[in-house]
Image (spheres, rainbow, N blue to C red):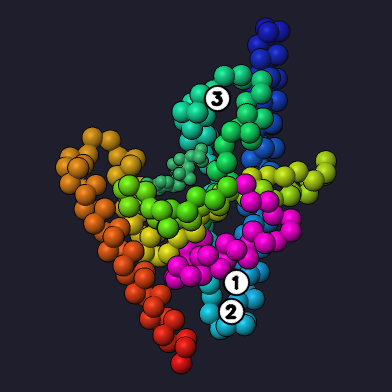
Amino acid sequence: MEEFKVERYMELLETGKKYAELMNKYQCAIMEVETKLKVLNAEFSLQYDRNPFESIKSRLKSPASIIKKMQRKGQLTDEASFARSIEENLYDVAGIRVICAFQEDIYRLAELLVQQDDIRLIRTKDYIRNPKENGYRSLHLILEVPVFLKSGKTPVKVEVQFRTIAMDFWASVDHRLRYKKDVKNEDEIVEKLRVCATTIAALDDEMQQIRTMIEKD
Ligand code: 0O2
């Protein structure tokens, strides 16, 4: 094998290793935050005999999505500092989605999580109180959590999305539309989704009221 090729392959392996280390950090941060949420859930169910969330899903952003988003942000520039640039510019490489039955639990859980003294709240986007134009509703928190590695303590960013079951149902249908090309009747679907989002919001409010009435007795 020619010398320059060996060097290039070594570089590629080195870059691959850096990427794997970075993703491992994000995976560890997911585990930290998931554990915190599960601890809160267990405590709630002991105290109030109900679970504040129904399920948790987590994911690491795929390499293709990372590259697409970095490109959109104009950050696909320097190959050598790519890993650092991902950390500085992307807040949702580590993503956790918490699905709750009731809206009230979303805010309660979010508050209890950000109050913890090893968590730093970087940003809140409240698309429940301020829904997106298309009807999207969710509470997004960008958190920084310490991850303890062999090399020491590192702060890592995690995006936590909180939604109700109904909001999650809506978002999953909307997601299909967002990622499908050349959809016929797109305007009609967008409008139908907007109407559904309003219906869902009303349903969530009603269910919340019913639960409050039940718990008063
Ligand atoms: P994927 O495939 O879910 O990862 P910023 O984080 O500020 O640089 P961004 O990413 O626009 O900019 O922030 P925002 O608004 O908080 O949205 C982040 C994520 O929320 C998206 O990630 C989606 O998961 C979700 N989201 C936001 N708007 C919508 C929407 O209208 N419909 C649906 N279904 N989901 C939405 P990604 O990276 O776009 O995609």
The crowd level at tag 2 (other Cα within 10 Å; few <14, some 14-19, many 20+) is: few
Closest to the observer, 54 or 1:
54
CA gap between label 1 and label 2 equals: 6 Å
- What span is in magenta? 98-122
Left or right of 117? Residue 182 is left
Task: Give the image quadrant in which the ligand numbered 1 is located.
Answer: top left
Dot 3 or dot 2, earlier in sequence: 2
| Quadrant location of the N terminus in the rendered image | top right
- Residue 16 visible in the snapshot: no
Q: Which residue is mark 3?
A: 75
> Given the current orientation, which residue lies at the most extreme front position?
130
Q: Which residue is mark 2?
A: 45
Q: Amino acid at mark 1?
A: Asn
Closest to the observer, 25 or 109:
109
Q: What residue lies at 39% left-to-right and 78% top-to-bottom? A: 209
Dot 3 or dot 1, earlier in sequence: 1
Q: Position of residue 205 (x, y in %)?
A: 36, 71
Q: Which mark is residue 147?
A: none
Q: What residue lies at 33% left-to-right and 42% top-to-bottom? A: 178
Q: Are marks 3 and 2 in contact (CB under 8 Å)?
A: no
Q: Is 216 above or below relative to 83?
A: below
Q: Which residue is mark 1?
A: 41
> Given the current orientation, which residue lies at the most extreme right position?
151
CA gap between label 3 and label 2 equals: 44 Å
Q: Are marks 1 and 2 in contact (CB under 8 Å)?
A: yes
> Given the current orientation, which residue lies at the most extreme bottom position?
217
Q: What residue lies at 37% left-to-right and 75% top-to-bottom? A: 207
- Residue 8 visible in the snapshot: yes
Q: Position of residue 119 (x, y in %)?
A: 69, 54
Q: Position of residue 123 (x, y in %)?
A: 58, 47
Does the magenta run of residues contain 12? Answer: no
Mark 2 vs ligand 1: CB below 8 Å: no
